[in-house]
Image: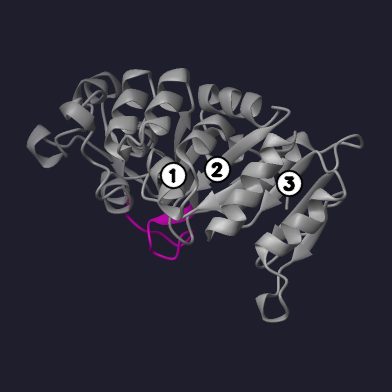
Amino acid sequence: MTYSLTSLGMDEDLCRVFRQLISLPHGIILVTGPTGSGKSTTLYAALQEIRDDETKIITTEDPVEYKLPGVSQIQVHSKIGLTFASTLRSILRHDPDVILIGEIRDLETAENAIQASLTGHLVFSTLHTNDAAGAYTRLTDMGVEPFLVSSTVEAVMAQRLVRTLCPDCREAFRPAREDLPEDFPYDRLEENGALYRAVGCRECRQVGYRGRIGLFELLVTTDSIRQSSHDRASSWIIKDKAVQQGMRTLRQSGWDKVLAGRTTVDEVARVTKGNDIIPNNKQTP
């Protein structure tokens, strides 16, 4: 596998911040989203970015999806007691620099991940939450103390996958304002001039789409986010603060891809359903 962060669909600014985060000496970096949203691929791309001869990386996964040269990968097997939590305890005895946990599913795994980050390791893992802000409350709901969540989680990346338009047959058109979602940045459309829609041709087997690309929402744990997490604030409040501090939501990431001619309004609306309301009605472009 030769994926890079930019090939996944991250824009330059987000990619620059994410590269800084995955280069931290310790802490927890989480990637969230539903099954099939590309979480593992993003984490593998991150490992490939930081992998070198001096960095010891060990993963515990279910299953091991890609083979990474220079990385020790462990396949969990719960039927014989080889769980995420048990393998993580063994991994720590080998003093790795970076640990990847396939998924944080229970309190024991979450506590072990936090303990690893507190003892000087950088930990990558995934969670099933609707957006980035939900990761903080999800860990607290598992039973992790809020002060541990706030002090160890450095950032959360939420993501979705959308189909990309076939470049050979996509068709430019100019939609009416009333035909677009309320939060669509129509003023930017006036600058761009047109959107694109799927048509279908021989190259894409009459589907109109070829390949997929990621939508990303990166929530960096700033001091105010740490305080909100520590105070057991709701995910809504955390998201509100993150948006105020410049976080671009999944929906906004999707509109960027639409305006760039990479995908369609319908695709973004489909995969970000439920994420279409920005806190405090801040429908920012």
Answer left or right for 146 relative to 152: left
Q: Earlier in the sequence, mark 2 or mark 1?
A: 2
Residue 167 visible? no
Q: Amino acid at mark 2?
A: Leu
- The image quarter containing residue 78 is bottom right
Residue 38 visible? yes
Q: Is residue 49 above or below residue 94?
A: above
**Residue 135: mark in rendering:** 1
Residue where numbered disc 2 is placed: 30
For the residues labelled 2 and 1, the Cα–Cα distance comes to 8 Å
Residue at 40% over, 51% down? 141
Q: In this orientation, which residue lies closer to the viewer: 72 or 249?
A: 72
Q: In this orientation, which residue lies closer to the viewer: 275 or 114?
A: 114
The answer to the question of whether label 2 and label 1 lie on touching residues, with beta carbons closer than 8 A, is yes
Q: Magenta stretch: residue 85 in it?
A: no
Residue where numbered disc 3 is placed: 99
- The image quarter containing residue 27 is top right
The image shows residue 55 at horizontal and vertical percentages of: 85, 37
Q: Earlier in the sequence, mark 1 or mark 3?
A: 3
Q: Earlier in the sequence, mark 2 or mark 3?
A: 2
Q: Magenta region: which residues?
A: 198-211
